[in-house]
Amino acid sequence: LDQAAAVILSPMPPPASARPAMQCRWCERALLPAQRRASLPQLRRSGVHLSAGARHVACSSKFTNMTEALYSYVMDLQPEPRSLRNVSEYTKDVPAGHMKSSPEQVRLFALLLKLMGARRAIEIGVFTGYSALGIAQALPGDGVLYAFERDPEVLEVAKAFWDKAGVGHKIRPVEGNAVEEIQRLLLGDGAEKEPFDFAFIDANKRAQMTYYEQCLELVRPGGLVIVDNVLWYGRVVDGERNDKITLAIRELNEHMKNDERVELTVLPVGDGIALCRKL
């Protein structure tokens, strides 16, 4: 264990009432229980490697804990448009409704799309169509979004919301296995061969490495590939979680970190998003 990265841990902790606060070696701030839940050896055995600086950030005051009241306040400052709220209200009552992108996430995408002047976009994993709707609304009148979804039933639900919002003409829904359908795009010609400006990946986590590589081929230099769920509800740093999905997400995160083809920014928005600007 790197001594510079160690956190002082008592091998036989006394009762909580008598236990002194654990401290960070850099700033001597007391560590909260949640910040010392997984030790560095546990994480390293699981393939998670935190630098000394990263460990220090975990105990700093550089972020604000998002309470329900604070989140409501943030949403009040930027209300959902009616068209998106319709999807939110529908999705909260369906199985796996938590898979819907968060409003602030989609709002960020819309801002980025407009700043980029994006015209062509890809989304992998549509679900009930919330994020695709927000993306399509941010595209210009001649813009197009290729929306890949394997479930025909939820795709029909999404299409109904898109048409109701008046953006159905901008979206080309593609039903089926996304890896295979995207490969057809890569091998296509004409308008389909034109580079894309933006790609959002929010689908089968164990296939995300393949999606990522495919999207990097399709997106132009200066374009964005965004990957969702890179924090995986905190499981990426839980040394006890070594299921196939968590391992796949950790692997992709490390891959993006070391990928010299992109400039990576990770934001704790929603369940964590990785923004990869293609160089």
Image: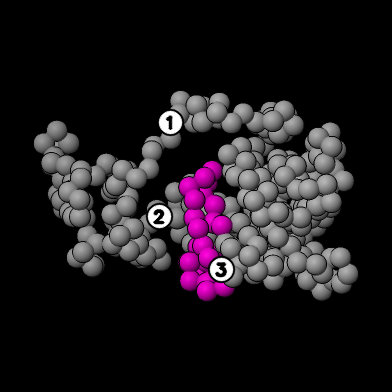
> Which contiguous range is marked in magenta?
252-275
Give the mark, 1 or 2, whose residue is nearer the N terminus.
1
Which dot, 3 or 1, sits closer to the camera?
Answer: 3
Q: Circle 2: is it few (<14), some (14-19), or many (20+) Cα within 10 Å?
A: many
Q: Circle 3: is it few (<14), some (14-19), or many (20+) Cα within 10 Å?
A: many
Count of number-bearing discs? 3
In this view of the protein, which residue sits in the foreground, 122 or 255?
122
Name the residue carrying label 1: 67
Is residue 97 within the magenta segment?
no
Q: Where residue 250 appears, x then y in whole percent?
A: 48, 62
Left or right: 230 in relation to 179: left
Is residue 272 within the magenta segment?
yes
Q: Amino acid at mark 3?
A: Val
Q: Is residue 89 above or below residue 195?
A: above
Q: Amino acid at mark 2?
A: Val
Label disc, if present, on residue 262 of the rendered structure: 3
Give the mark, 3 or 1, whose residue is nearer the N terminus.
1
